[in-house]
């Protein structure tokens, strides 16, 4: 009798790469719902445009690269990139902005490097940064959270939102406004306390900033669920959030007019939680060992704070992550874990000694 | 309860042990023919000591251990030797190797047995010889000859004896059922080993907590013996020797060393049983317990099989259906290898024959790209970075592979098991290990070739010079003769002086100048040193990889190289003085 | 002094730059001496990389002379027994781009070993003289044989044999030399068959 010959191990655990990616997409759901509630239909439209353009761009490049299309689309990595972008881009942004960012992510930042697994930078963040640098006005126009809208205006309905997105109509005055991080960035000599009193974004907030606080809480919940499902380890997110909190504590400055904001405000504003649990944890572009992830996360947390506090952009997760991506191979070199039976960990470039 | 240590990584594949535990140990009818490979152990092949046509009795030695690391082979039943030739054997390559075929006469008649029922009175040497003579090699799967393992006691005192009853691979229950049914004999075997090793302070039996009956049986028989039964949570691969040592003692076997260097010996429980059989009953290793499992077999059960039984014989008696079977595995699903044919014989290391159905172990899906998700490094029991090793293996970056400690990989398969992208990681590592070992071997042979080439150059040069100076001497002689011939009045004294001179000249030309000799010796020394270095490097490689046979070979070559260096250095000092 | 410098900014700048230049030049020079990486002479390193078949296909009488010639600027792609891997290794050492093998000197073939058909051998010792590594044993009018372990497969003994009794046979892989082959990267190419690995089960 003749049998098939294969290398051990025989059989695999059930979890597949596509399923992990689906899980990540699913975990963004709470955050997505909160954001949609707070900022209206724009987000859903972003999501649809981003997903469609991501999948078509991916399919197109795979075809050009002569790769099996459905085999690679089934890994859902394009969808993850699209979802992350859609969550990061401002709602009611013009459609071409979303398309440009997504196509750039998929084609330039991912496929041209060799596709999934070979990209040194997080594709979604590359797309975001490209859009931010190229179209600063569109990228910094954020919708006002629903609970802060004046009594006589409301978020545009679905059809109206579609019209705004696809025909470049501007939304009605008052529908867009500043974000909490914007307020701190453009602070002219007010004490933190005064900012909090003067602005409804803070005065009506539960703890950090209307709209943003609950969106961040929702991403935190989604992230913890992924942590529980062992999609990633705690090292990266915890290091990033910890460093961010530590930095904002160190430079809190007693709430003076120079203070860049409180730890709570930083942790629950902007893309902090989305970044910590969905971007920093991107395995492809991050470091490989747990020790490395601690350093990598801390570096990103530090950079986020530095750019938020002293740079010229209100939020900085995308920049910080890309800088972290740059440093990842370097960190990897020094953080190879100690192997069983060895006294010390070695460097990744260590030469074999003739013992 | 003794403290236990937790190893990093590990996986929890489904146990699948209950299927084969429903029945007790079974026996098969005697097969018509038995095929006994000469290499059933780690190390060099045994040397045949019978001839075709000879009649042999059960337990008769067919092949004796060759020098170095090797183990003897015995006849599992009486009959005639009908062939000594290359046959397909149980090996991942599916290749053939030398085998002895016995056609059984059905009488199953024993040869006269030699035993030491009063082993307490026997010396360690006697016992070790008996174990070596019985051809016992590790029954847990690695097949290292036990007598050699137990010999490490003479180099460094052994204070800890560890019996490995972990059996962490799914499906396999051979050790489990052996303990349940014959715990008393295993304990006797442990006592023999303990006596042989000079009563080590600590004797531990390591077992996973998914075998409550076996633990109970062991506890019952260990009472008052000083043997401690330690059970710990089930996790694959706790049964790896290095992992088990860490779990039980918290100590790590340093890379490139053996447990004996820590004063430990680790034996499988089945090996302890085989030692008892050999010492007390005088029966060499001619049978073992093998689990038959998998949905493609109608019956799942443990058998006490005769070594050399063809796998097909085992399958035929258990309603095997080839149409159902996705692959045939010898060993467990995690580390076992697939068999190309069912005609191969079961050998001393065959713990299990697994014939899974297509739903049980489906064909591998095509691999997806690696996303460095890190599940593999979370699963790695040796704390390696499998995802990095994978990239370097694909890039054939041997330097990086070695700096990431590729040779500390025990090939347990945990990384491939958890890989969500279905990447056959272990196969990558195996091929890279082979490549690196080959590259080193090629380098070593190249060094030898270089040395031989350079030696030849020197020899030719020397010959040239010798020829040249001979010619010169002849020329001088004739000239002198010419000068002399006209003046015959010259005294014979001067001609005698000429002869001496010529002789001196010849002497000089015959012997290469000291400078030349020195230069040559220095070259030889350099080459010898290089060879020594390379041999040492390769020894480390081989030690890590663990094949005991290669280790011994390499040790010998290191020794030879060292001797050469010493000799040359000595000659060199002689010449320079 | 100070006032001279502060008045003549040009002079100050010149002095500063010269001073800095001298300082750093000195430092670098010191560092280059102090932390010098000791390495074998390049010829020896090159010789290490060559396969030592001593076959002369490169046009030089042995590997060492070819190594010397490469060090003097010769092309690195003249070694068929070493093949592309050797070329790559040398290119890596010399930090140049790796050319492909120069077909003029031969093609990369599987490694072979010389075997003498012993009953045909007339004992002429011609092959013994040709062997660059002294791997043939024998004496005049007595049968010769090749020490297989020492044979580099250089082919040099085939030509001189007057009775053509030397065969170059490929090395047969046995079970001890067998090693796992690397998996095929099926998904990276175009194939999407059910099995990503060995299909040779038939």
Image: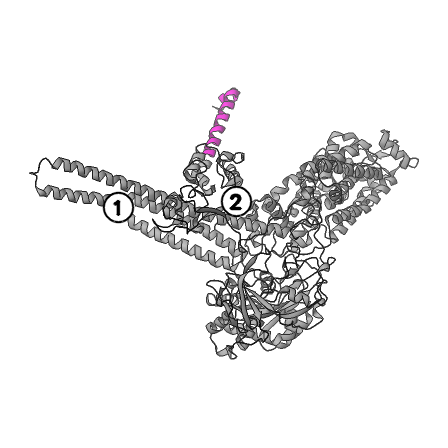
Chain letter for mark 1, please: B
Residue appearing at x 38%, y 55% in the figure: B563
Task: Find disc 2 in the rendering and name its residue.
Answer: C110
What secondary structure is the magenta-colored segment mainly? helix
Q: Nearer the viewer, residue A105 or B486?
A: B486
Does the magenta portion include C8?
A: yes
Q: Position of residue C32 (x, y in %)?
A: 46, 36
Q: Position of residue A117 (x, y in %)?
A: 68, 43
The N terminus of chain A, quarter of image: bottom right
Q: Is residue B44 visible?
A: yes
Q: Are marks 1 and 2 on the same chain?
A: no
**Crowd tier of the residue under label 2, counting other residues whose Cα lies within 10 Å: few below 14, some 14–19, many 20 or above:** few
Task: Find disc 1 in the rendering and name its residue.
Answer: B511
Residue found at the far left of this picture: B489
Task: Give the label, 1 or 2, closer to the camera.
Answer: 2
Q: Nearer the viewer, residue C73 or A244?
A: C73
Does the magenta portion include B59?
A: no
Q: Position of residue A170 (x, y in %)?
A: 86, 30
Residue found at the far bottom of this picture: B118
Q: For residue C160, which numbered disc appears in the image?
A: none
Highlighted range, magenta = C3-29
- Mark 2 falls on what kind of element? loop
Q: Is residue A189 visible?
A: no
């Amino acid at each position: 009798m003749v049998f098939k010959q294969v290398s051990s191990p025989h059989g695999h655990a059930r979890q597949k790469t596509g399923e992990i990616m689906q899980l990540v997409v699913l975990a963004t759901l709470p955050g997505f719902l909160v954001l949609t509630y707070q900022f209206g239909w724009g987000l859903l439209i972003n999501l649809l445009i981003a997903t469609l353009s991501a999948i078509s761009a991916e399919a197109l490049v795979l075809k050009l690269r002569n790769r099996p299309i459905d085999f690679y689309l089934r890994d859902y990595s394009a969808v993850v990139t699209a979802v992350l972008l859609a969550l990061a881009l401002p709602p009611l942004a013009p459609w071409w902005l979303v398309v440009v960012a997504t196509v750039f992510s998929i084609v330039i930042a991912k496929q041209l490097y060799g596709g999934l697994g070979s990209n040194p930078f997080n594709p979604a963040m590359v797309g975001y940064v490209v859009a931010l640098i190229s179209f600063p006005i569109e990228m910094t126009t954020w919708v006002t959270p629903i609970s802060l809208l004046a009594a006589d205006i409301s978020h545009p309905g679905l059809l109206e939102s579609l019209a705004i997105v696809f025909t470049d109509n501007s939304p009605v005055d008052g529908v867009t406004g500043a974000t909490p991080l914007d307020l701190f960035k453009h602070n002219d000599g007010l004490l933190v306390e005064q900012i909090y009193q003067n602005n409804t974004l803070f005065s009506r907030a539960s703890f950090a900033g209307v709209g943003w606080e609950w969106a961040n809480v929702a991403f935190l919940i989604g992230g913890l669920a992924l942590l529980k499902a062992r999609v990633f380890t705690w090292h990266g997110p915890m290091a990033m959030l910890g460093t961010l909190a530590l930095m904002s504590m160190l430079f809190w400055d007693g709430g003076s007019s120079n203070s860049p904001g409180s730890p709570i405000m930083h942790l629950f504003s902007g893309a902090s939680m989305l970044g910590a649990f969905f971007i920093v944890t991107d395995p492809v572009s991050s470091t490989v060992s747990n020790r490395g992830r601690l350093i990598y996360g801390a570096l990103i947390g530090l950079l986020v704070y530095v750019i938020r506090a002293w740079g010229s952009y209100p939020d900085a997760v995308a920049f910080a992550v890309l800088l972290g991506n740059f440093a990842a191979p370097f960190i990897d070199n020094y953080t190879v874990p100690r192997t069983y039976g060895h006294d010390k960990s070695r460097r990744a470039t260590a030469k074999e000694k003739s013992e | 309860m003794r403290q236990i240590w937790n190893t990093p990584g590990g996986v929890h594949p489904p146990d699948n042990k209950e299927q084969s535990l429903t029945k007790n140990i079974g026996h098969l009818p005697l097969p018509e023919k038995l095929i006994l490979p000469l290499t059933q152990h780690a190390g060099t092949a045994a040397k045949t000591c019978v001839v075709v046509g000879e009649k042999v009795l059960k337990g008769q030695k067919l092949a004796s251990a060759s020098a170095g690391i090797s183990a003897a082979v015995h006849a599992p039943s009486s009959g005639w030797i009908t062939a000594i030739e290359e046959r397909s054997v149980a090996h991942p390559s599916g290749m053939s190797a030398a085998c002895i075929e016995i056609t059984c006469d059905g009488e199953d008649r024993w040869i006269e047995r030699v035993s030491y029922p009063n082993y307490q009175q026997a010396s360690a040497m006697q016992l070790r010889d008996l174990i070596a003579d019985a051809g016992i090699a590790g029954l847990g799967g690695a097949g290292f000859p036990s007598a050699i393992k137990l010999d490490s006691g003479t180099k460094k005192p052994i204070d800890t004896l560890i019996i490995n009853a972990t059996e962490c691979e799914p499906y396999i229950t051979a050790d489990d059922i052996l303990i349940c049914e014959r715990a008393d004999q295993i304990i006797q075997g442990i006592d023999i080993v303990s006596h042989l090793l000079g009563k080590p302070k600590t004797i531990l039996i390591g077992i996973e907590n998914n075998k409550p009956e076996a633990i109970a049986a062991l506890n019952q028989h260990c009472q008052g013996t000083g043997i401690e039964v330690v059970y710990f949570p089930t996790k694959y691969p706790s049964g790896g020797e290095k992992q088990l040592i860490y779990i039980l003692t918290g100590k790590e076997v340093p890379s490139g060393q053996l447990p004996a260097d820590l004063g430990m010996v680790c034996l499988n429980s089945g090996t302890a049983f085989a030692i008892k059989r050999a010492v007390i009953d005088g029966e060499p290793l001619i049978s073992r317990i093998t689990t038959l499992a998998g949905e493609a077999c109608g019956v799942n059960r443990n058998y006490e099989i005769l070594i050399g039984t063809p796998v097909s014989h085992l399958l035929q008696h258990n309603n095997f259906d080839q149409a159902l079977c996705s692959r045939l595995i010898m060993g467990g699903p995690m580390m076992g290898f697939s068999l190309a044919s069912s005609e191969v014989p079961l050998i001393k290391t065959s713990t299990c024959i697994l014939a899974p159905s297509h739903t049980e172990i489906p064909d591998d899906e095509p691999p997806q790209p690696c996303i460095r998700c890190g599940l593999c490094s979370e699963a790695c029991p040796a704390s390696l970075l499998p995802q990095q090793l994978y990239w370097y293996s694909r890039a054939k970056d041997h330097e990086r592979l070695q700096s990431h400690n590729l040779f500390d990989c025990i090939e347990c398969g945990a990384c491939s098991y958890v890989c969500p992208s279905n990447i056959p990681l272990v196969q990558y590592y195996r091929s890279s290990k082979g490549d690196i070992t080959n590259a080193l071997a090629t380098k070593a042979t190249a060094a030898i070739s270089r040395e031989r080439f350079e030696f030849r150059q020197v020899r030719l040069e020397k010959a040239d010079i010798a020829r040249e100076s001979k010619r010169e001497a002849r020329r001088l002689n004739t000239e002198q003769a010419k000068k002399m011939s006209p003046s015959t009045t010259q005294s014979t004294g001067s001609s005698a002086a000429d002869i001496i001179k010529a002789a001196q000249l010849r002497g000089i030309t015959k012997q290469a100048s000291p400078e030349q000799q020195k230069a040559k010796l220095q070259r030889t020394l350099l080459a010898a040193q290089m060879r020594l270095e390379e041999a040492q490097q390769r020894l480390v490689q081989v030690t890590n990889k663990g094949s005991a046979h290669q280790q011994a070979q390499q040790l010998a070559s290191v020794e030879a190289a060292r001797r050469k260096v010493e000799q040359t250095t000595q000659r060199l000092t002689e010449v320079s003085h | 002094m100070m006032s001279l410098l502060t008045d003549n900014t040009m002079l100050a700048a010149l002095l500063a730059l010269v001073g800095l230049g001298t300082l750093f030049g000195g430092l670098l020079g010191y560092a280059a001496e102090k932390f010098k990486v000791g390495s074998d002479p390049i010829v020896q390193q090159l010789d290490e990389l060559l396969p030592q078949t001593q076959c002369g296909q490169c046009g030089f009488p042995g590997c060492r002379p070819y190594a010397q010639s490469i060090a003097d600027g010769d092309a690195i792609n003249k070694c068929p027994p070493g093949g592309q891997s050797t070329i790559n290794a040398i290119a890596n050492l010399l930090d140049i781009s790796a050319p492909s093998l120069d077909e003029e000197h031969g093609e990369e073939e599987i490694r072979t070993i010389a075997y003498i058909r012993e009953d045909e051998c007339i004992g002429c010792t011609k092959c013994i003289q040709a062997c660059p590594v002294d791997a043939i044993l024998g004496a005049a009018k007595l049968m010769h044989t090749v020490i297989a372990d020492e044979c580099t497969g250089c082919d040099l003994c085939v030509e001189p044999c007057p009775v053509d009794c030397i065969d170059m046979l490929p090395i047969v892989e046995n079970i001890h030399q067998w090693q796992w082959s690397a998996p095929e990267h099926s998904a990276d190419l175009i194939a999407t068959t059910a099995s990503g690995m060995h299909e040779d089960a038939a």
